[in-house]
């Protein structure tokens, strides 16, 4: 890129880019990089669970009845009873936000 930039004033941008196998748009982009965009906060979806609903799901998963069950088992059991608090995936998300999701035991990794 530096070589194409150095030669461009003498032979022209197109010829310099062809010689060094660099796209012209890449050279122009390299000359003037775009300013980084500020990160805008994501809006909360209108159908998202409220904090009290999230706490109800967490309390249910921590109850004595479901403490040793996976969210999938708790979800299926509650559906059999006709209760729906949140989707199975949402239960996993709530647990992950509290640092409780993932493998319960240390998994061994075999060497390559």
Image (cartoon, rainbow, N blue to C red):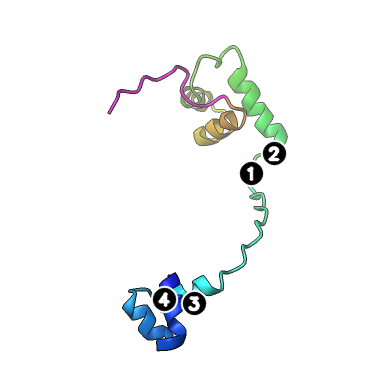
Crowdedness near tag 4: few (<14), some (14–19) or many (≥20) residues, C-alpha within 10 Å = many
The rendered magenta stretch, by its main secondary structure, is classed as loop
Q: Which residue is mark 4?
A: 4
- Mark in front: 3 vs 4: 4
Q: Position of residue 88 (x, y in %)?
A: 50, 32
CA separation in Å, label 2 and label 3:
48 Å
Crowdedness near tag 2: few (<14), some (14–19) or many (≥20) residues, C-alpha within 10 Å = few
CA separation in Å, label 1 and label 3:
44 Å
- 4 and 2 marks in contact (CB < 8 Å): no
Crowdedness near tag 3: few (<14), some (14–19) or many (≥20) residues, C-alpha within 10 Å = few
Image-quadrant location for residue 98? top right
| Residue extending farthest right | 52
Which stretch appears magenta?
Answer: 100-112
Tell me, for residue 50, which label it has, or none. Answer: 2
Q: Which residue is mark 3?
A: 28
| Residue extending farthest top | 64
CA separation in Å, label 1 and label 4:
52 Å
Q: Label 2: state its secondary structure.
A: loop
- 3 and 4 marks in contact (CB < 8 Å): no
Q: Earlier in the sequence, mark 1 or mark 3?
A: 3
CA separation in Å, label 3 and label 4:
11 Å
- Mark in front: 1 vs 4: 4
Q: Which residue is mark 1?
A: 48
Tell me, for residue 67, which label it has, or none. Answer: none
Q: Position of residue 67 (x, y in %)?
A: 56, 15
Instruction: Out of 99 and 76, give the one closest to the viewer.
Output: 99
User: What residue is drawn where x is 66% and y is 32%?
Assistant: 54
């Amino acid at each position: 890129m530096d070589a194409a930039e150095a030669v461009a004033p003498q032979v022209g941008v197109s010829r310099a880019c062809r010689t060094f196998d660099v796209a012209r748009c890449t050279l122009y982009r390299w000359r003037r990089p775009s300013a980084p965009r500020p990160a805008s906060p994501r809006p909360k979806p209108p159908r998202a669970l409220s904090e009290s609903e999230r706490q109800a799901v967490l309390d249910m998963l921590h109850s004595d009845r479901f403490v040793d069950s996976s969210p999938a088992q708790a979800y299926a059991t509650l559906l059999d009873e006709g209760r729906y608090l949140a989707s199975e995936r949402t239960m996993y998300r709530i647990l992950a936000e509290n640092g409780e999701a993932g493998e319960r035991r240390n998994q061994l990794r075999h060497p390559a």
